[in-house]
Image (tube, rainbow, N blue to C red):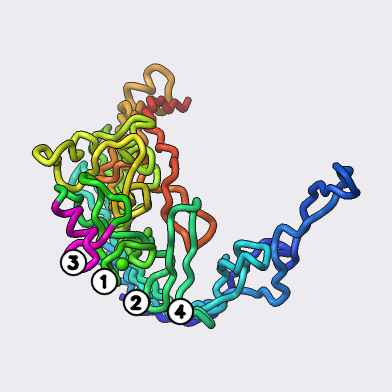
């Protein structure tokens, strides 16, 4: 058994080279009178940040290692880290001529646990080893300089908020509250003296109702709330290797639990506007007062009314999954048989890569494309599916 502890300061300089300079991009400009003439010119494409520096992370780590002969080994690491001068692409006022600027801004705390357990056992002819890993991380924004929150927009429709006291990069959207089931509900919503149901401008029976976060009786942009984050509650993995006489089998798996994905593909697949093919969610849609579907899915409408087209919890999904990365089954021919035909070793194997993924996520792949901007993670706007592949192989040595 071994106990270790460490403390250190590290820098992250994932600033591109010369990012503090304003860079110029070639463009044409019209000069002269009348229609003028086109002259080649340059315009600044990024804002200059002359005092841009490294991120600094101070990390404390305590680790425990525990082993029982060669059969079992357990490692537990607990860490607490504080990053200051974070490198963030922060939105800037449009009158500066730029939408974002790379700045050193704020402090964030990360704490977490990493556990690995490995076992190696032999029972007669049977060999078996396992590897388990588990990791949990929590991040929390401690300070953002002179503001309390940074709101960032992605693809012009999806909002994120990074707020002091919360994790980095939360989805920031309206929260749906079922649908308007009948005209009475619409009338209540449109009555300014009746706050039981908040007004959704232009909404008809069969459209979304929303939670009125600020209680003013009207659904507006101010009713956006934190509705999820791409950072998982924990990640885990298990791999195993087994061997018995001539046979070997190995399996590697991996999982993520407790995160959310902003599946903004649903703006098209699940809009019920019929501009492209819909998901099977359309089967549960509101059809009429007597046939309201599951009460959560809006009516089909060639052009959405109310706020059906606005990003809301309708577009946010659980991103938890468990994936079998690969399975390999092999057979090694008995040596004495092979030697008779002049072969030293012959192994036949079959491998399946990514054969199974268990998830409720409706998109192609819950490992969605990550933007380079840490303030806007977890956006699925057409993530490529992972390929399944099956390989038959033969290892021969003479
Ligand atoms: Ca409101």
Q: Distance between the residues labelled 2 and 4?
A: 43 Å
**Residue 380 vertical placement versus 347 (above, below):** below
Determine which residue is flagged by label 1. 215
Image quadrant where residue 159 sits = bottom left
Relative image position of residue 236 (x, y in whole percent): 30, 57
Can residue 197 be found in the magenta stretch? Answer: yes
53 vs 327, nearest the viewer: 53
Q: Earlier in the sequence, mark 4 or mark 1?
A: 4
Closer to viewer: mark 3 or mark 4:
3
Kind of element beneath mark 2: strand
Q: How far apart are marks 4 and 1 (CA)?
A: 22 Å
Is residue 96 covered in magenta? no
Left or right of 207, for residue 159:
right
Q: Quadrant of the N terminus?
A: bottom left
- The numbered mark, 3 or 2, whose residue comes first in the sequence reads 2
Q: In which quarter of the image is residue 192?
A: bottom left
Compare residues 368 and 196 and report the one nearer the observer.
196
**Neighbour class for label 4 at 10 Å: few (<14), some, many (≥20)?**
few
Distance of label 3 from label 4 (alpha carbons): 34 Å
Mark 2, residues whose alpha carbon is within 10 Å: few (<14), some, or many (≥20)? few
Q: Nearer the viewer, mark 3 or mark 2?
A: 3
Q: Give the SS element for disc 1.
A: loop
| Residue stretch in magenta | 184-199
Would residue 145 appear left or right of 382 to someone viewing this image? right
Q: Nearer the viewer, residue 82 or 307?
A: 307
For the residue with label 1, is its CB less than 8 Å from the closest atom of ligand 1? yes
Query: Could you tell me which residue is drawn at 42 percent across and 78 percent down?
Result: 164
Observer able to see residue 196: yes
The residue to which callout 2 is attached is: 2
Residue positioned 34% across, 30% down in the render: 277
Q: Which of marks 1 and 2 is nearer the N terminus?
A: 2
Q: Name the residue under label 4.
A: 148
């Amino acid at each position: 058994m071994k106990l270790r502890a460490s403390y250190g300061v590290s820098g992250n300089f994932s600033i591109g080279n010369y990012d503090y300079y304003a860079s110029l991009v070639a463009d044409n400009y019209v000069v002269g009178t009348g229609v003028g003439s086109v002259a080649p010119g340059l315009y600044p494409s990024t804002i200059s940040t002359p005092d841009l520096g490294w991120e600094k992370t101070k990390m404390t780590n305590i680790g425990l290692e525990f082993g029982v002969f060669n059969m079992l080994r357990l490692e537990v690491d607990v860490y607490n880290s504080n990053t200051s001068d974070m490198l963030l692409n922060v939105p800037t006022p449009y009158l500066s001529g730029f939408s974002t600027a790379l700045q050193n801004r704020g402090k964030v705390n990360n704490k977490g646990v990493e556990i690995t357990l490995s076992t190696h056992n032999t029972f007669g002819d049977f060999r078996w080893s396992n590897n388990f890993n588990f990791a949990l991380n929590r991040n929390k924004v401690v300070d953002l300089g002179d503001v309390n929150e940074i709101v960032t927009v992605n693809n012009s429709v999806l909002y994120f908020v990074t707020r002091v006291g919360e994790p980095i990069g939360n989805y920031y959207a309206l929260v749906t509250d079922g649908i308007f089931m009948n005209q009475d509900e619409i009338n209540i919503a449109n009555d300014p003296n009746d706050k039981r149901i908040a007004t959704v401008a232009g909404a008809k029976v069969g459209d979304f109702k929303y939670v009125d976060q600020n209680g003013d009786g009207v659904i507006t942009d101010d009713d956006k709330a934190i509705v999820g984050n791409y950072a998982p509650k924990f990640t885990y993995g298990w791999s195993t290797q087994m061997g018995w006489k001539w046979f070997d089998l190995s399996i590697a798996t991996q999982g993520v639990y407790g995160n959310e994905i902003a599946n903004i593909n649903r703006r098209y697949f699940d809009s019920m506007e019929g501009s492209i093919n819909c998901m099977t969610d359309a089967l549960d849609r509101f059809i009429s007062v007597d046939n309201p579907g599951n009460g959560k899915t809006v009516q089909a409408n060639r052009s959405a009314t109310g706020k059906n087209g606005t990003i809301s919890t309708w577009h946010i999904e659980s991103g938890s999954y468990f994936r079998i990365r690969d399975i390999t089954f092999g057979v090694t021919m008995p040596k004495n048989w092979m030697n008779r035909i002049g072969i030293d070793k012959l192994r036949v194997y079959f491998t399946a890569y990514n054969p199974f993924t268990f998830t409720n996520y409706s998109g192609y792949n819950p490992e969605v494309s990550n933007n380079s901007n840490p303030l806007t993670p977890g956006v699925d706007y057409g993530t490529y599916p992972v390929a399944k592949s099956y390989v038959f192989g033969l290892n021969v040595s003479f």
